[in-house]
Image (tube, rainbow, N blue to C red):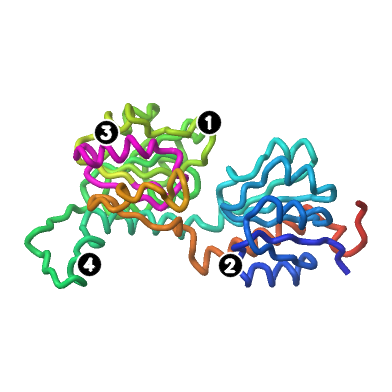
Amino acid sequence: MSKIKVLCAFGVPDEMARRLKEEIGPVTILNSHEEDEIVDAIKDQHVFVVRSKPKVTPRIIENAPVLRVVARPGVGTDNIDKESCARHNVEVVNTPESSVSSVAEFTIGLAVSMMRHIYTTCALLKEGQWGKGKYTGKTVEGKTWGIIGFGGIGRRVAEIASAMRAEVVGFDPYVPEEEFNNHGARRVLRLEELLEKSDIVSLHVILNEQTRNLLSAEALAMMKKGAYIINTSRGKVIDQAALRQALEEGHIGGAALDVFDTEPPEDREMICQENLITTPHIGGSTKEAFQQATEIMIRKLKDLLQPDLTGPIGD
């Protein structure tokens, strides 16, 4: 019988917790994201499963003497203090493969909804207004779509956008040129070139010191007048105040944000702008993505924790 104990953060899906109990060991589910509650609960736990929240702080890690793994079902691990984990020999695992299709399809959907005014005209029609003559949209076909970050999600977006007959360009200094070619995109070597050429820009990067405020006021000013932005990665990769100004001035034609620098977003005036579509960080929230994340995470945990899953472990 497994002696591995699993602590699940508040918000981990019930089905995921059930599978962890079946495959890994006894599961405790937290009731909030409060650090004090986590510190109290984690003292005898070997695995801590989190989503984009809570913050896994040094204090939490320091108070987890038998912790072996912090598992993140999903892509981003910026809420986990990885330096503290490394100092305490705690592994960090995630499942970036699980949400590729979900986030890529969502990105395409946001682009079409924004460019065809689907969200705006739907809201008007529900209020009894017929907006047919007021709103004329644009097609993806024939536009230049710039992709910042060419990992799994960026590559899938490139494939779909290319199939929609967009010219796709991509920027990612860590990906070889043949990967761009293999997925229907042309590599550009400078971010400035992508911003200057693109009618649509979508972001698919992790958050780190290199990507924080990647789209600054200066970067936004380089973009074509009337260009569109889609961000399904992390809110802090865009200077949100600068984006608000660019939207208000009409330099940016529209933006679609699934992520924000603070979640839930605090700038109510910004998110209510007509040329902005906002969603509550649901890009990867599909049944299929959750199922894949669960299976991939369990497989990775088993690889790390064998043979402890079938026998006693030291403390």
**Location of mark 2 (residue):** 291
Q: Amino acid at mark 3?
A: Met
Query: x and y percent of residue 233 in the render?
Result: 46, 46
Q: Is residue 55 left or right of residue 170?
A: right
3D distance between C-alphas at marks 2 and 3: 38 Å
Q: Amino acid at mark 1?
A: Glu
Q: Is residue 201 left or right of residue 100?
A: left
Which residue is more in the foreground, 138 or 70?
70
Element class at badge 3: loop
Q: Amino acid at mark 4?
A: Cys
Looking at the rendered image, the disc whose residue lies closer to the viewer, 1 or 3, is 1
Which mark, by number, is residue 223? 3
Which mark, by number, is residue 122? 4
Q: Amino acid at mark 2?
A: Gln
3D distance between C-alphas at marks 2 and 1: 31 Å
**Location of mark 1 (residue):** 209
